[in-house]
Image (cartoon, rainbow, N blue to C red):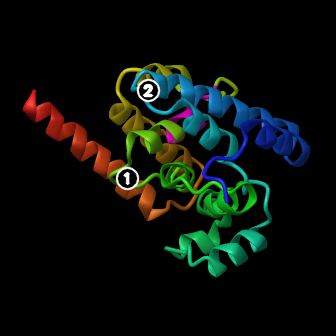
């Protein structure tokens, strides 16, 4: 099993298996992740790879997401049974390993955390999470502001992005996963502690 799959092979697979809009989004997330990561000296190839495959499981049915999650012991909360699409991130990490032989734990962790986040995220994970939110094809109020913030302060951008996600869910009466709330609170505490030190 290779540690890194061939990027050209992956792009061809995505073009053949994903809907055109999902494929475009994946390419844009990869480019955005590379742009953000280059400022921090992160591995561009790994970021590109993670961006390309982050949504591998996005088109799967709720039933299949739940089946894979149960097989792989990925279920962490009853909310995931109510909203199976939340499982597309951890299931996508499993698929990235199985479909393309990706075994780099940093890449797999980034894919697994790109929807709900998690307290203690690495810069790699933050970048993939934010790239998914701010790639140029996204259109929502505040996207440009969040994109600008992501270029200067990943932690502040994470807090802002999570606040936006939570507000969006509240406005639409959607159920919230506790991990999103825990992640938001983690970044709020981090930023408040940083402000005290300044």
Q: Residues within 10 Å of mark 1 (few under 14, many from 20)?
A: many
Exactly how many numbered labels are in the figure? 2
Check residue 169 for magenta coloring.
no
Q: Is residue 78 visible?
A: yes
Q: Is residue 151 above or below residue 17?
A: above
**Chief SS of the magenta region:** helix
Quadrant for the C terminus in the image: top left
Left-right relation of 19 to 156: right
Q: Position of residue 107 (x, y in %)?
A: 54, 48
Say which label, 1 or 2, has the lower sequence index.
Answer: 2
Q: Residues within 10 Å of mark 2 (few under 14, many from 20)?
A: many
3D distance between C-alphas at marks 1 and 2? 17 Å
Q: Nearer the viewer, residue 176 or 1?
A: 1
Q: Position of residue 122 (x, y in %)?
A: 38, 45
Which residue bears the numbered disc 1?
183
Which residue bears the numbered disc 2?
150
Q: Position of residue 124 (x, y in %)?
A: 45, 40
Q: Is residue 170 above or below residue 178?
A: above
Q: Which residues are magenta?
A: 129-135
What residue do we see at 17% from left, 35% from top? 194
Q: Nearer the viewer, residue 124 or 113?
A: 124
């Amino acid at each position: 099993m290779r540690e890194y799959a061939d990027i050209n092979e992956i792009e061809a697979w995505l073009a053949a298996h994903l809907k055109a809009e999902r494929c475009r989004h994946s390419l844009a997330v990869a480019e955005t992740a590379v742009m953000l990561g280059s400022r921090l000296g992160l591995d561009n190839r790994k970021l590109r790879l993670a961006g390309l495959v982050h949504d591998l499981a996005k088109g799967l049915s709720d039933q299949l997401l739940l089946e894979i999650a149960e097989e792989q012991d990925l279920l962490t909360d009853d909310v995931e049974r109510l909203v199976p699409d939340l499982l597309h991130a951890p299931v996508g990490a499993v698929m990235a390993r199985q479909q393309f032989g990706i075994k780099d734990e940093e890449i797999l962790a980034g894919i697994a955390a790109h929807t709900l986040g998690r307290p203690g995220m690495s810069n790699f994970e933050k970048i993939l999470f934010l790239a998914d939110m701010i790639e140029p094809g996204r259109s929502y109020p505040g996207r440009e502001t969040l994109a600008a913030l992501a270029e200067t302060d990943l932690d502040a951008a994470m807090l802002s992005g999570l606040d936006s996600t939570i507000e969006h869910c509240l406005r639409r009466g959607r159920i919230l996963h506790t991990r999103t709330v825990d992640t938001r609170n983690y970044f709020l505490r981090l930023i408040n502690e940083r402000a005290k030190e300044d």
